[in-house]
Every structure is written in structure tokens, then in C-alpha cells.
Image (spheres, rainbow, N blue to C red):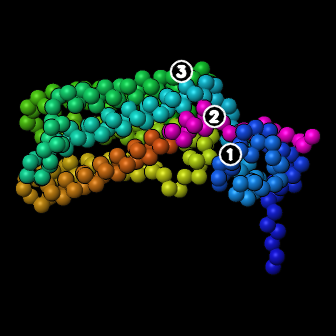
Amino acid sequence: MHLNQESPIANQIKDMVVNRQLSCARCGYDLKSLSAGGNCPECGEPIRLTIIDTVDPAARRLASIERPQVTGNSLVCVSVFLFLAVAIAVLVLLSRAPQSLLITNVIQTFNDPIWIWISSGSSGLAFVSLIPIMWMCRCGLVQGCRLGVALTGSGLLSFSILMGASRWVLLGGKDNGVVLLLFDSLLPAVALSVIFIGLRRLVPRLGQRSREFRLAQGSRQRMNDLLAALVFVIIGRTLISISSLDSNLATLGMIIMVLSISLIIVGLLYLIRNTLWIRSALCSPPPSLGQLLKPKT
């Protein structure tokens, strides 16, 4: 059976020319002033394919966001400072593990009060970075994100306070295993859970304005995975707490913790990548066909 391979957009743009600078999707040649129905003179790529790759009708159907650059910058800063806060907190936690569990000397250097303060401060900076989006939600300038922003903000503030308070518990010579478990794992994990739930509601709503984000839906790290990893971090930490230092159970607990923490760190790196995509889409939205093309004269 013969199939018509011509794109539906071909007839719509055959009498149009490219009205602005547009780089060929294959070779980067400037297609400005060329017929939209033709091919790139450098590599032969159909110009319509570059147009389809540039124009994003799905994003343009969404409600506009006031101060998009501020929103994009705010979201990226939240993800970066959150990553720093969690990464440093993880290193502090691992530095507290018994030496019999083969923790390297480099990680053991994080068993110092300054690193807890840095983790707390990074989470506080993430909360401060979220304030512009909070203000815009309150003023109605960002629609549908209020609950996600509220959960993310409360989780960031709680994590910052908990890390600051744990300075005396983790590094102050306390020997109560229950208190240690509460402050170095359980309460921070609850705060992180609130953050991840909030980001699960906030990031996809803003991410719909980014083609890259939408196309990566199937492969990007999901917040549900991070929530599950937090549960396994608690399980691993509990196994270490209830077993003797040289037991197989403690070793198993450390393995579970390290694997789960690795998943969280990778997930936060994916989050940074996603927010960079969203920032790019908010700061430089794709043009419409009317902006990109004009009728032939």
C-alpha cells in the first residue's frame, strides 16, 4: 500500500518564507528568507522539519506566566540548593557510620559541625529562592501551583531547621540511638518527602511549557522513585541502629542506604536538568508560525 509521506504542514507553509533567523536542525545553516516549503541548501534537510522542531503549539496553548525569567531562575536555584543541601547531609550521615563499615577517610572529614550548617544554609537558600514563586502564586500570576509551592516551601524550611537543630544531636556526643535515628534520618526524610511531593506537583505544571521536558517524561527521574528511596534509606539506617557494628545485618543496612542515597542524588541531578529545560522555555519561549514565517512577496 502506497503511503503519502508529505507532512500535513507542507501545504500550509508552501507559500511562506522564513521571517527570522532560524538555524537548520541538522547542520545549523541560517534559513532566514528561504522558502518554508523547500530544503536546506547546505544539507538538504526539509525546512519544514526545522520549523516543526522549533514551533511548539502545545506550550503556546497554556496560560502565560508573568515574569517568566524570574520564575525560571527561581526554580533552577531551588533545585541546585536542594541538591547541595541533600548531598552534604548525606555525606555527614555517612561520616557517622561505624569505621567497621569501610567508610573512606574523605567521607569521614564531613563529621564536622560546619558541614551541617552548610547543609542547613543551602536548604534555607532554596527556600529563599522559592519566595518569588510563592509571591506570584499569592498574587495569581502563576496558576495551579499554589499547593506544590506551599509543600515545597514548608519542606525546605523544615529541612533547614532540622539540620540546624541536629548540630547538637549528631555532633554533640549524644549516645541515645533513638534520638540519633530520629534526627539524622527519620525527621529529615519526612521533610524531604514533603519537598518531593511538592515538587511532584509544581515541576510538571511548569514543565509543560518545555518540549524537552515533555518528551523526556518516560525516561526522567520521577519523584515517586525518590519517595521510595527515602523509605529504603530509613530501613537501612534502622538496620544499622539495631544491629552490632560488625554484623551482616549492619553491612546489609549500609548497602541499602548507599544504593538508596545514590538513587536520590541521581534523581536530584535529573531535577536540575529538568528545571534548566523549564527555565529555557520560560525565558525564551518558542515562536509561533505567524512570528516565524511571512507570505512570499
Q: Nearer the viewer, residue 176 or 210?
A: 210
Residue at image x 45%, y 51%?
221
Q: Position of residue 272 (x, y in %)?
A: 45, 40
Residue plotted at (44% across, 31% down): 77
Instruction: Report if residue 179 is visible in the image.
Output: no
Circle 3 residue:
135
- Which comes sooner in the sequence, label 1 or label 3? 1
Residue underneath mark 1: 23
Residue 284 image label: 2
Residues at discs 2 and 3 in contact (Cβ within 8 Å):
no
Q: Is residue 291 magenta?
A: yes
Nearer the observer: mark 2 or 3; the answer is 2
- Label 1 residue SS: loop
Residue numbers of the magenta segment = 275-297
Q: Residues within 10 Å of mark 2 (few under 14, many from 20)?
A: few
**Quadrant in the rendering for residue 170:** top left
Identify the image quadrant of the N terminus: bottom right
User: Does label 1 or label 2 sit earlier along the sequence?
Assistant: 1
* Residue 136 % position (x, y): 57, 23
Q: Residue at x 69, y 34 (%)?
A: 63
